[in-house]
Amino acid sequence: MTPALDSSISVTPAPGIARSGLAQGVETIDARMLVLLRCVLGVSALAVVLIDPPKFGRLVGLTYFALGAYCAYTVLLAAISYRLDWPAPPRALHWADVVFYSFLIALTGGTSSFFFLFFFYSIMVASFCWGFREGMLVTVASSVLFTAVELSFAQVNGQYEHGNTLVPAAYLLIFGYLISYFGGYERLLRRRLALLREINNLWNPRFGVDHTHGINLDRLLEFYGGTPCVLVLRRPSPALNYVMYSASRDKPGYSSTPSYVAESAAGALLRLPDSLAAFYHGPGGSWWWRLRGYSGYDFDLGARTSSFLADCAAWANLLDTHAFVTVPYVQRDGTSGRIFLTTDRGGFSHADIDFLAQVSDAMSTVVENMSLVEQLISKAAEHERQTISRDLHDTTIQPYIGIKLALDGLYREAGEGNTLSPRISDLINMAEMTVRDLRQYASTLKDKAAMPGEFLVTAVKNQSERLGRFYGIQVEVTSDISPRLQGRLAAEAYQIIAEGLSNVLRHTAAKSAFVTILCENSHLLLKIGNDAEPGENGTKKFMPRSINERVQMLGGRAFVEQRPGGQTVVHVTIPM
C-alpha cells in the first residue's frame, strides 16, 4: 500500500495542543555540527577582516570588536552544548544570528559585503530543526533586513543602485525557499518515521486492543494537530458488531474506551470500498484548500479517482468539519473499518493518504501480533496452570487435610471442658478455611476462571474479616470500582492486597489497617497501610519485594510512604 503520490507539507499543528517529543524533539541533523559550524563562521569572518581591513569600511575597529564578541559567544555556546551532550539548538539562537549578521553587513558595506551569505546558515538551522514555516520566516526576515540595511547604507552615501539591492535579496528569497522546503520536508519525513516507530513498538498484550487503538489515535491527533480522529470497525466475531474509537483534544484519555454503534450509523461511515482512500475540503475552508477540493485513491487499481464526492461531502457534514482524510483499516481475521482524521485548519494531500495508509497497516499488524502473542501466552499459561493445580493438590492441600484431622483427634481427646478446646477449635476452623481456599484456587487455576472485577471488593472484605476474627487486626476497606476493571487484573490486585495485609500481620504489631481501591481514568490505584505500632517512633525504609515484582510485571509502579503520624502506606498504580 505504498503508491507513488505527490508529497507536500500540509497540516499546520494547532496551537494549544500538548506536544510530545514525537512532534517537537525529532533530530534532523547533527546538533554538534550546527554548533561547531557557527564557531567556524565566526572565526572565518574575523580572519577575513584581519587579512584585508581596508576593504570593510571605516568602522574596522567596531567590526573587530563585534566579531571578537561573536566568536567568544559561539565558543561559549559550544562549551555549554558539550556539557549538555549537544542538545538541539533553541529557537532563539538562529534569530539572534540573523540580527547579528544584519548588523555585520551594515558595518562592512552593505551589498559589497559577502557576509550576507551567512544568512543561509540561519535559514538552514531554522528549516531543518523547526520546519518549513520557520525556515520561510527566517528567509523573509533576512531578505527584509538585508534590503533595509542596504537602502540605509545607500542613502547615507548618496548612491541608489537598486540592482545591487534587489539581486542579493532575490537570491536570498529563492535559495532560502529551496533550503526551507527541503529542510522542512526532511524533518516531516523523520517525524513520520518516528510516529511509525512508536506505533510498532513492542506492546504489552495485557493492555488489550482497545488501549492500543486509543493510544495510536492520540498519536495521530497530536502529529497532525487535528480535531477528532475516529476509527470505526466492523468485527465479524464472535458476533457481527460495530465499534468506534474517538480521540479528541477536548477529552484526553477517553480514546481507549470504545463505543458500540448501530449498524445503520456504522454503515454510513463505511460505505466506501475497502480499497479506497480519500481527502475532502469543503467550501468553509481557505481558498487554497478549496482549490484542492476532493480526491480519492484506489489501492487495488493503483490510480486516483474523483468518484464518491457526494459521500465525502455527507461525511464532512456528519463529522462537522471542513476538511478530513480517510483511509481503510483491514485485519487478517476479517475485521475491517476506516480511519477518519479531521482538521479545523489547514488541509490534506495525497502524501497524507499515502502516510496514513502506512499507519493503518502498522496499526493492524500490531493488533494481529498482539493477538498471536496473547494466544501463545494463553496456551503456555494454561499448561502451567494445570501443572500448578496438580502440584498444589498433591503437595499442599493433602498435608493441610492431615493437619485438620490431627486437630480433630486432639479436640476429641481433650474434650469440650478443656481450657485449650476453644483455641483448638479455632485452629480447626482456620485449617478448614485454608483447605477450602486452596481447593478453590486450584479449581480456578485448572478451569481458567478469573475473578470478576466486581468481586474484588467482596474478596478483600472477606480476607479482612478473617484477620479481625483470628488475629484482632481491624481492616477498613474503601473502594470505587470501574467497570473497566477486568478479571485478570482484579485477581492480580487481590493477590497484591492479600500480600500487603499479610505483611502487616507478619512484620508489624499494628492492630488496625486500611485498604483503598480506586479506579481513576485508566489506572487502578491501591493503598495498603497500617496505623502506627504501639511504642514505635519510626519505621525503616523498605520496599515489599513480592508486591513490587508483581506490579512491575503488570506495567505499574509501587512505592512506600512513611507518614509523620507513624502510618506506613504502600501505594500501587497499575494501568488498566
Image (tube, grey):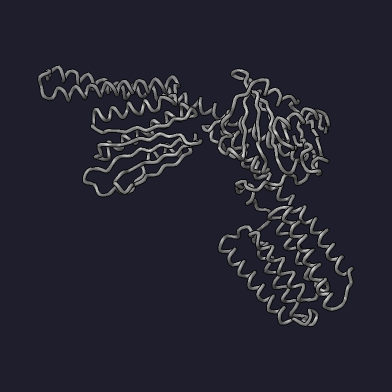
Give the image location of residue 156, x and y in percent. 82, 77
Q: Residue furthest front?
A: 284
Give the image location of residue 215, x and y in percent. 59, 37
State the image quarter where residue 167 is shown: bottom right
Give the side of residue 67 with respect to residue 513, left or right: right
Query: Which of 491 and 134 lies nearest the eye of the viewer?
Result: 134
Q: Is residue 531 above or below residue 422?
A: below
Give the image location of residue 312, x and y in percent. 76, 30
The quadrant of the rendering that contains the N terminus is top right
Query: Which of 370 and 220 lies nearest the eye of the viewer?
Result: 220
Residue at 54% of width from left, 26% of height from top?
A: 375
Give the image location of residue 39, x and y in percent. 67, 69
Q: Is residue 192 above or below residue 154?
A: above
Give the side of residue 562 with respect to residue 182, left or right: left
State the image quarter where residue 211 is shown: top right
Query: Which of 249 and 466 lies nearest the eye of the viewer?
Result: 249
Q: How many marks?
A: 0
Residue at 88% of width from left, 76% of height from top?
A: 159
Query: Which of 174 and 406 lies nearest the eye of the viewer?
Result: 174
State the image quarter where residue 497 is shown: top left
Give the side of residue 573 with respect to residue 54, left or right: left
Residue at 64% of width from left, 34% of height from top?
A: 363
